[in-house]
Image (cartoon, rainbow, N blue to C red):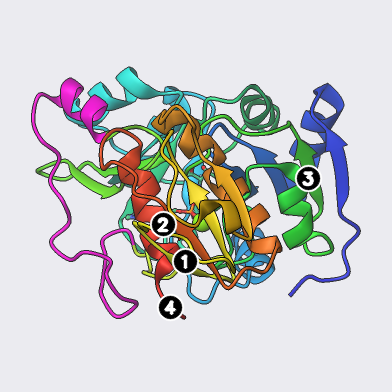
């Protein structure tokens, strides 16, 4: 593992984009903001740099990574897009959607980054800082979320610093992200398949496709299952505290992650209370989710009690992350 590195933190801007591009070209690791969460980027074509991502994160297995590019032309050099994949790319890119498509014959993404699969996950992030870095670098950048494996994904540069300082070369600080949960992943197979709910709602994708998205046959219920998105292990988005879901009341030594205008019995005496969205806006809740989990976890409550969140729009992704956080380790 590369430890004891001097991690530089730069405010976003032209100098930071150029430093990021130089660092990536030299095989270094650069954390940068996207609209979903901060990513930990490496040159997709450089297998050694990709290997450093896994060791810096302490990622136990070589889960495949998402290749980030600046435009559709770059995406089509990496993956083969059929009519439906193109339809989704044109409707939602740049944006919080990742498409899994067959690799091109001369796909430059290293086999380590795709974990030896013949498909590749691609997305064009909708973030001016991410885009500036991708354009300055020129090639594809593979980037998982910029956190230690198993921790909550970072929505601020300070979260990245807390997890990865000394293990990576550069952090570009572009302020808080806007979406707050990772991208939605769609497998462009015979039937387009929702591999991971995320920052783009199922409803919006289905409206463009005109058909419902299939769900993977094997759900990511346990670490033993073989989900189609192999990184989706059951316990993944984990704070240190126990997480209790759909609570109807709060104990005095618990922290409450609230949602909407309602109050719960015991709320006044809770160890801490944060409300994801007092007006029950699911987009706002998604943007606040990981930061609030970190803040409540830092208070070392006996448990984090979470109110019920509706399973619609971005609620599907929020509930997916919360269920993973609630899996006992
Ligand atoms: O919003 C996001 O997607 C963020 C930002 C940084 O872009 N990235 C992110 O990456 O969430 P990561 O590594 O945490 O999640 C990547 C997911 C994993 O679940 C992995 O299994 C899946 O993508 N994946 C990657 N390549 C795949 C492939 N060829 N087939 C199926 N799933 C794939
Ligand atoms: Mg992650």
Q: Which residues are magenta?
A: 202-229
- Depth check: 38 or 274 in front? 274
Q: Kindly indicate the quadrant of the structure image that contains residue 326.
A: bottom left
Crowding at label 3, few (<14), some or many (≥20) Cα neighbours within 10 Å? many
Q: CA distance from mark 1 to mark 4?
A: 8 Å
Tell me which label, 1 or 3, sits earlier in the chain.
3
* Comparing labels 1 and 4, the label whose residue is closer to the camera: 1
Tell me which label, 3 or 2, sits earlier in the chain.
3
Residue at 70% x, 42% y: name it: 156
Give the x, y percent position of residue 196.
Answer: 32, 50
Q: Which mark is residue 197?
A: none
Give the x, y percent position of residue 37.
Answer: 57, 42
Q: In screen coordinates, is 191 left or right of 288?
A: left
Circles 1 and 2: CB distance less than 8 Å? yes
Q: Which mark is residue 171?
A: 3
Q: Kindly indicate the quadrant of the structure image that contains residue 191.
A: top left
Give the x, y percent position of residue 57.
Answer: 64, 66
* Comparing labels 3 and 4, the label whose residue is closer to the camera: 4
Q: Is residue 288 magenta?
A: no
Which residue is tagged 4?
Answer: 328
């Amino acid at each position: 593992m590369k430890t004891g590195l001097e991690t530089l933190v730069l405010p976003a801007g032209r100098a930071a984009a150029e430093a990021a591009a130089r660092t990536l070209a030299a095989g270094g690791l650069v954390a940068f903001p996207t609209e979903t969460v901060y990513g930990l980027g490496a040159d997709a074509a450089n297998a050694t740099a990709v290997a450093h991502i896994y060791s810096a994160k302490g990622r136990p297995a070589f889960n495949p990574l998402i290749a980030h590019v600046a435009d559709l032309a770059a995406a089509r050099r990496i993956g083969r897009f059929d009519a439906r994949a193109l339809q989704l790319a044109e409707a939602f890119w740049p944006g919080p959607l990742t498409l899994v498509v067959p690799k091109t014959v001369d796909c430059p993404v290293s086999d380590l980054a795709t974990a030896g699969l013949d498909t590749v996950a691609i997305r064009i992030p909708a973030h001016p800082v991410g885009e500036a870095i991708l354009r300055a670098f020129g090639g594809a950048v593979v980037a998982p979320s910029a956190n230690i494996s198993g921790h909550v994904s970072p929505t601020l540069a300070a979260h990245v610093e807390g997890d990865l300082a000394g293990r990576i070369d550069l952090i570009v600080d572009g302020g808080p992200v806007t979406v707050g949960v990772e991208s939605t992943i769609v497998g462009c197979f015979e039937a387009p398949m929702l591999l991971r709910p995320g920052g783009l709602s199922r409803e919006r994708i289905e409206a463009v496709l005109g058909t419902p998205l299939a769900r993977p046959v094997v759900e990511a219920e346990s670490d033993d299952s073989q989900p189609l998105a192999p990184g989706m292990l059951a316990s993944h988005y984990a704070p240190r505290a126990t997480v209790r879901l759909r609570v109807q009341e709060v104990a005095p030594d618990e922290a409450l992650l609230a949602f909407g205008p309602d109050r719960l019995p015991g709320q006044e005496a809770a160890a801490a209370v944060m409300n994801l969205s007092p007006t029950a806006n699911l987009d706002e809740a998604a943007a606040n989710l990981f930061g609030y989990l970190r803040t409540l976890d830092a208070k070392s409550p006996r448990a984090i009690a979470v109110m019920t969140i509706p399973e619609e729009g971005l609620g599907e992704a929020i509930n997916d992350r919360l269920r993973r956080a609630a899996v006992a380790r």
